[in-house]
Amino acid sequence: MSGSMLLLLVEDEPLIALALQETLESAGFYVLTAVDGVEGRKALESTIHDISGLITDIRLGSGPDGWGLARCARSKRADLPVVYVTGDSAHAFEAEGVPQSVLLQKPFAPSKVLSALEAVLA
């Protein structure tokens, strides 16, 4: 599944970001990380044609939230796989989430992100 795929991970909680990055890299993915919505948007703009998927928290501090990042990404690449992770925004997934995306409710085992990726990359 992973091969040499590059993923963009946008997560403002350092410990969660580190755990997810380690899990993804252990599975063979390359991971580009961003710590907030502003950095995430910049990374999307510069790598939109290079990344194989977006994993984003919903509440990201400054800049767009995860819903906005995913919509921005999909406006540039309609087929980009998206996995959302959230502690408190799952209730808005049906209204705010992009089609054919997956949402993981925090807390979750970091390995769950691999199952979510498998679902959206398939």
Image: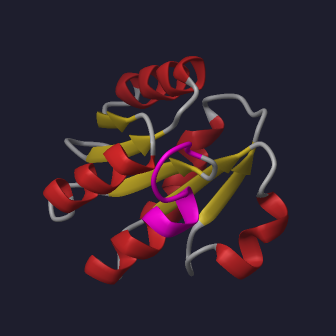
Q: Where does residue 111 sit, x and y in percent of width and height?
A: 61, 31
Q: Magenta stretch: give its range.
A: 60-69
Q: Where does residue 31 sit, x and y in percent of width and height?
A: 31, 35
Residue, x 56% and y 77% (percent of image)?
Answer: 98
Residue, x 25% and y 52% (percent of image)?
Answer: 42
| Residue 81 visible, this orientation | yes
Taking 64 as reference, is 106 left or right? right
Residue, x 58% and y 27% (percent of image)?
Answer: 13
Magenta span contains residue 89: no
| Residue 122 visible, this orientation | no
Q: Nearer the viewer, residue 35 or 98?
A: 35
Whether residue 106 is situated above or below residue 90 in the rendered picture? above
Whether residue 69 is situated above or below residue 78 in the rendered picture? above
Taking 70 as reference, is 29 left or right? left
Q: Where does residue 47 sit, x and y in percent of width and height?
A: 17, 55
Q: Main secondary structure of the magenta part?
A: loop
Q: Where does residue 21 sit, x and y in percent of width and height?
A: 43, 26
Query: Residue 41's image quarter?
Result: bottom left
